Image: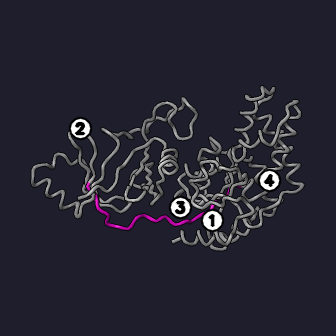
Amino acid sequence: MRIDHVGLEVHDLYAVELFYRRVLGFEPVYRYASRRTPGLRTVLLRRGEALLELLERPRARPPGDAPGAPPGQGVAAPPGARLDGPPHHLALRVLDVDAAHRDLVARGRGGEVVDGPRTTGDGCRELTLRDPEGNRVELSTRVAPEPLHPVRAVIFDLDGTLLDSEENYFLADERLLAGFGVPFTREQKRPYVGGGNRDMMVDLVRRFGLPATPDELLARKNELYLALAEAGTPVFPEMRRFLDLARAAGLPVAVASGSSPEIIARLLRSTGLDGLLPVTVSAEEVAHGKPRPDVYLEAARRLGVEPLECLAVEDAAPGVEAARRAFMRCLAVPFLVDRPLAEPFHLADLLFEGGPSTFDAGAAWRWVEGLRG
């Protein structure tokens, strides 16, 4: 018998994984989303001989502790989603879990067993015990290979990823705010790159005390932007090539964007991409824009593919965070190549640090092919 891993149950899987990877140097071994226990998601991390399992499941959270939620917005557990006792566990590797169970019963210690033996969805045979203080101890052995989830769909961000459109967005914002006598610089625009347009308008009203509602600002900005965009919005050539490779391989594709539905439709039409990307999701069609995962989860739902089997293609830190919170793989090509790169980029599965000028569709596609199983 030996220690196999330590399991930590967390409220915010994205934030905790980022900590262990960026601060302590752990690397991912595999991810798993349970079909037997809806909402249960795990990441197994390794550094050297140390294995750490992070688990997230629907349960009550303290106020302000919801993934990606503003302070004060706790998330209530669904009916029946309850954890008994300490949520963490110690996993001990044994040669034969069923033999260990029989031995416990024979020695009159079967009362400590609270679950199992059972075979888990990620390929382990497990038996769970409670120690005298209620701590969970798993006896475990692997009986099937580690789960490999093939890439079965590709979901593209639009602005800054497929389309070189961020300059037009800045000009639209600049002209919008000039109408209120407010100067707006490229440096002020940077924190909003990759987020939802309506979320930006909400913040601008608060920030500058504008005498208009966010929806009024958004409608005016869309008018200004469309006039600029339809006059000319280039498609990044290598990203277009990557889209063509995905479609040629038969993978379903979609767009998940912070832009409005009308802008998405008109941009795709004006660039000739509308026939190639029939599924589109706007942040205005879901509850929250990026960095929340809503647009990506909705795109996966419309494609009929599990999020864990989707690849998100992104250019901005909020989009990378949204993709990882959706539990998708992520290919990142930063539009803004600031140094150091924002932390979410370090959770991308494939990162072209130099930005669009360094993106190689062929190299990216060879990586995808290795994930298709």
Few, some or many C-alpha atoms within 10 Å of disc 4 (few <14, some 14-19, many ≥20)?
Answer: many
Q: Which residues are magenta?
A: 139-157
Q: Quadrant of residue 187?
A: top right
Label number found at residue 252: 1
Image position of 344 with respect to 151: above or below: above
> Element at badge 4?
loop
Label 4 to label 1: alpha-carbon separation: 24 Å
In the rendered image, which residue does mark 4 sit on? 165
154 in the magenta segment: yes
In the rendered image, which residue does mark 2 sit on? 133
Instruction: Work out whether mark 2 precedes mark 3 in sequence or the reverse, and give the earlier one.
Output: 2
Q: Residue at x 34, y 58 (%)?
A: 120
Name the residue type under label 3: Glu
Can you give x and y, in whole percent of width and height, for residue 74 in the image?
50, 33
> Element at badge 2?
loop
Q: Is residue 177 left or right of residue 103?
A: right
Label 1 to label 2: alpha-carbon separation: 50 Å
The nearer-to-camera label among 4 and 1 is 4
Instruction: Work out whether mark 1 precedes mark 3 in sequence or the reverse, and give the earlier one.
Output: 1
Label number found at residue 309: 3
Can you give x and y, in whole percent of width and height, for residue 299 in the image?
62, 54
The nearer-to-camera label among 1 and 2 is 2
The nearer-to-camera label among 2 and 3 is 2
Q: Is residue 252 left or right of residue 134?
A: right
Q: Is residue 268 left or right of residue 19?
A: right
Can you give x and y, in whole percent of width and height, for residue 292 in the image?
60, 44
Label 4 to label 2: alpha-carbon separation: 58 Å
Name the residue type under label 2: Glu
341 in the magenta segment: no
Q: Quadrant of the N terminus?
A: bottom left
